[in-house]
Image (cartoon, helix red, strand yellow):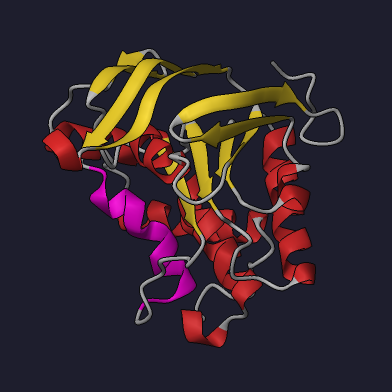
Amino acid sequence: MIEISNLTKTYGTGDVAVHALGGVDTVVEKGQFVAIMGPSGSGKSTLMNILGCLDRPTGGTYVLDGEDVSRLSKDSLAGVRNRKIGFIFQSYNLLPRLSALKNVMLPMLYDGGNHLPEGEQIERATATLDSVGLGDRVHHRPNELSGGQQQRVAIARALINNPSIILADEPTGNLDTASSEDIMGLLHELHDQGATIVMVTHEPDVAEHAGRVIVLRDGHIVSDKMNGMGGNGGKI
């Protein structure tokens, strides 16, 4: 699903250059649940931005679902993001004036290749919200939902275009313990259904849910281990 080779990212030039990634190599197979950890400044956010086609590497290659996206234009990267990647953010990134239903429908509206009639888009979005336990909240706006419910809307939005991979950036960072457990349970359900998930987290107990944990430090992978406790580590 993901294959990166000698991936580098440098910000600035000369004496002020910052080498955020210093030659990263790894493969994520279809169906894996991978957690990426590391201290502040380790390069994990930079790596996530590149994996999510939000940024391009300075050097190396990134193949996503069989397509080399390393040198695509910004417009082409936007198309890949919408077709192949579902994002879950720490801050949910929901539009406050839109209902849960309309927030979930947004990726379909941005997909130039989507020709579904509006009625079918509504039907799909409603079914997706129902699948994450929010079938009775479709017309609620974000300020009418709890943090855990808002994150469930964000997960439904991530799923609506049937992405090849789900990228979760600190998905429980703004949630209390009970809501965090609910969201991780939902991610487990998605993984059990065959989803490929890459998750950035700084919380060891959250990383324990993944089947594989990659640790970054100073732009390099310093540890890459299967985790027998979570995420069905046998899926590789």
Helix, strand or loop for the magenta stretch, by majority:
helix
User: Residue 180: image x %, image y %?
Assistant: 72, 63
Q: Is residue 107 magenta?
A: yes
- How many marks the image carries: the answer is 0
Does residue 21 appear anywhere in the picture? yes
User: Residue 208: image x %, image y %?
Assistant: 78, 42
Residue 48 falls left or right of residue 130: left
Can you say whether 144 is above or below 63 in the image? below
Can you say whether 108 is above or below 119 in the image? above
View extreme (right): residue: 229
Quadrant of residue 195 within the rendered picture: top right
User: Residue 183: image x %, image y %?
Assistant: 69, 58
Q: Residue at x 26, y 39 (%)?
A: 55
Q: Residue at x 50, y 78 (%)?
A: 139
Q: Which residues are magenta?
A: 98-111
Residue 42 falls left or right of residue 23: right
Does residue 160 appear anywhere in the picture? no
Compare residues 55 and 158 and report the one nearer the observer. 55
Compare residues 228 and 119 and report the one nearer the observer. 228
Q: Is residue 127 magenta?
A: no
Q: Residue at x 32, y 38 (%)?
A: 81
Q: Residue at x 61, y 33 (%)?
A: 215
User: Residue 86: image x %, image y %?
Assistant: 45, 44
View extreme (front): residue: 15
Q: Quadrant of the C terminus?
A: top right
Compare residues 220 and 76 and report the one nearer the observer. 220
Quadrant of residue 228 within the rendered picture: top right
Compare residues 146 and 43 and report the one nearer the observer. 43
Quadrant of residue 145 within the rendered picture: bottom right
